[in-house]
Amino acid sequence: MEEMKKAILEFAETNKKSKFYFNDFTALFPDEKGRDVKKILTQMINEETLDFWSSGSTSMYGLAGAGKHADGED
């Protein structure tokens, strides 16, 4: 589990984008089930390592404090 968290953080920190789709993270772990990746992402949100953003039709994840998030948008 900790190795997956490190891989997610490394991916998010080294990528130029500030928000990522769920499928971006599942691609990192092709041997894992989607629900297992979702559990890790949820845990990271609860730990305030990642932020969750949703427009209602689109859901994305990003590093906490990085990029533009819903509470800072018009």
Image: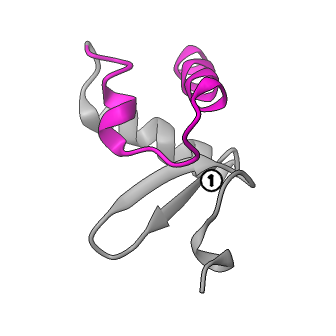
Among all residues in the image, which is located at the extreme right? 65
Q: Position of residue 50 (x, y in %)?
A: 62, 47
In the picture, which quadrant includes the C terminus?
Answer: bottom right
- Residues 52 and 47: in front is 52
Q: Which residues are magenta?
A: 1-30
Residue drawn 42% across the image and 41% down it: 39
Identify the residue at horizontal 60%, vertical 43% (top origin). 44
Q: Which residue matches tag 1?
A: 46
Mark 1 Cα-neighbour bin, 10 Å: few <14, some 14–19, many ≥20:
few
Left or right relative to 32: residue 71: right
- Residue lying at 26% horizontally and 12% vertically, measured from the top left: 31
Q: Position of residue 43 (x, y in %)?
A: 56, 44
Q: Nearer the viewer, residue 10 or 1?
A: 10
Q: Quadrant of residue 25?
A: top left
Above or below, 36 relative to 70: above
Q: Of the residues shown, which amino acid type is indicated by label 1?
A: Asn
Q: Reply yes or no: does residue 8 show up in magenta.
A: yes
